[in-house]
Image (spheres, helix red, strand yellow):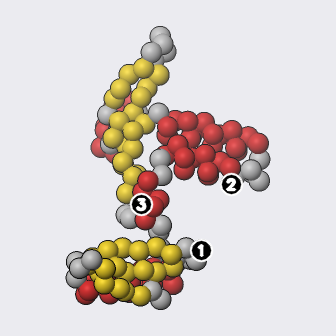
Amino acid sequence: MGHIERRNGRWRARYRDPLGRQLSETFTRKLDAERFLREVQVDIERGRWLDPRGAETTVKEWSEEFLSLARRLAPTTQQTYKRLGELIGLRRARIDLGLRKIRVTEQLIRMSAGGWLRNEPKTPEKLAELVATTG
């Protein structure tokens, strides 16, 4: 478990992550710091804890790390994942690690005549409409 200390008129909640690194959050109220520590401990025990520094990770960095861990996969699978990673890199994404979601806000489409087109990503509704009109 972590501990709470008062510093400069605020409350600092300190804890160790599953790898043993010490992390902290600062709060105005002691009650909020205590609640935070309880929630972190439960998340760690249940295997649901996410490193808050992960929000600073770009999609490109995440893709490269994922691919480096996928070396045991067949070469064709690695190539497929690499192409997918490159496609993800062509999109602007808003990542919320707390909610474990990625929201794509813009995509770049390579035109057959050359050049690029910026476009809104397809929503499930637009995809369903496209399938209905072409099917």
Q: Nearer the viewer, residue 104 or 124?
A: 104
Residue 131 visible in the picture: no
Q: Earlier in the sequence, mark 1 or mark 2?
A: 1
**Secondary structure at numbered mark 3:** loop
Q: Nearer the viewer, residue 56 or 9?
A: 9
Q: Amino acid at mark 3?
A: Leu
Question: Would you identify the image quadrant in which residue 107 lies?
Answer: top left
Q: Which residue is mark 2?
A: 69
Q: Which residue is mark 3?
A: 97
Does residue 135 sit above or below 104 in this rendering?
A: above
Q: Which residue is mark 1?
A: 19
Q: Foreground mark, 1 or 2? A: 1
Q: Amino acid at mark 2?
A: Leu
Q: How many marks?
A: 3
Name the spot of residue 106 as percent of width and height, x first.
35, 36
Q: Foreground mark, 1 or 3? A: 1
**Secondary structure at numbered mark 1:** loop
Q: Amino acid at mark 1?
A: Leu
Name the spot of residue 96 as percent of width and height, x first.
37, 57
**Secondary structure at numbered mark 2:** helix
Name the spot of residue 100 as percent of width and height, x first.
42, 61
Name the spot of residue 59 as percent of width and height, x first.
49, 46
